[in-house]
Amino acid sequence: MNKTGLVVVTGAGGFIGGHVIAELRRQGYTRLRAVDIKPLDEWYQRFADVENLSLDLTGKAACERACGGASEVYNLAADMGGMGFIELNKALCMLTVLINTHMLMAARQAGAHRYFFSSSACVYAAEKQTAAEVTPLSEGDAYPAMPEDGYGWEKLFSERMCRHFTEDFGLETRVARYHNVYGPYGTYDGGREKAPAAVCRKVIQAQLSGSGEIEIWGDGEQTRSFTYIEDCLAGTQRLMQSGIREPLNIGSDQLVTINQLVDIVERIAGVRLERRYRLDAPKGVRGRNSDNTLIQEKLGWAPSIRLEEGMRRTYEWIHAEMTTPTSRAVFV
């Protein structure tokens, strides 16, 4: 890939986008533009040698500003969060369709050579995710379509937009279906956090307060696989550099219950907490796991970082944030 052409990363003030910018810098890309709706001082990772822009990408003009002169575009911008957010904010999640639509139009107008879209495992049909002992989801399981209401429909529609911009306009697009990505430098409170970060925060809060208990949404027996950010970055770049035009799972296939996730964090923290189950809380599908057959066939690679190791790193970062909070820093 051309390391001197302009690479644009949206959602760069957030979790995955911030890590994408950091990784591209590390690899020697010299022209980077980072874009996010948040004010710059609220970004998780911000670099002085990167062009950093605060723009609302639901607007077409803002997308044209973001994509001007771009060679490659990584679109990771979305109004989203964990299950507690996406179940209660379906309209907001669906309005993200404006971002990907306008970004595709702007990337095409700018003459970009390649465009990456971050989709989600939430595109998969709900009827295939009704049991905790779920059969891993392969890429074909998205159809016949009945994805997660709101968020999943937006992602699936945007996948189709990418496909048709490739077919009709020649814009090379790449689509990853992320499975529950987690790690440091991401949201861990405020209502948009996902399960790994939320569990870490709750365990740390129980330690600091001395409450000795933790609230778990649902009965704790719902299952998921969780993908550490380093695997996400490796898979994303491999896909972006490949010739694969169809959507591809990027997800761990290490299936655990939420109770087992709590077990892992308790062992890391060296505590054992009383569990209170909130059965009326948002909890999503009963089971979800990634089938990595296609990514292994196409890329000769699949995520490999064990949940225990990834959660240790995540816990340590969140613990530091909660016990020695600092203002957002500019990294040099």
Image (cartoon, helix red, strand yellow):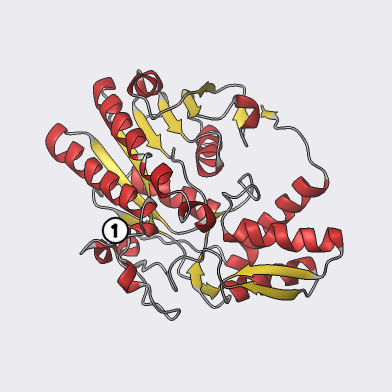
Q: Nearer the viewer, residue 293 or 53?
A: 53
Question: Is 169 situated left or right of 192 in this image?
Answer: left
Location of the C terminus (image quadrant):
top right
The answer to whether residue 295 is above or below residue 325 is below
Position of residue 169 relative to residue 117, above or below, is: above
> On the rendered structure, is 263 left or right of 80?
right
Q: Residue at x 66, y 62 (%)?
A: 199
- Compared with residue 196, is residue 17 higher up or lower down, i.e. above or below? above
Q: In this view, does 42 lie to the left or right of 285?
A: right
At x 46%, y 48%, the residue is: 89
Return the residue at label 1. Answer: 298
* Secondary-structure class at tag 1: helix
Residue closest to the far front: 280
> From this viewpoint, is residue 1 visible?
no
Residue 174, x across and y down, in percent: 30, 44
Query: Residue 37 location, x and y as percent?
Result: 51, 29
Residue 207 on image: x %, y %: 83, 63
> Which residue is outermost to the left?
168
Q: For the residue marked with disc 1, what is the amino acid?
A: Lys
Q: Nearer the viewer, residue 326 or 215?
A: 215
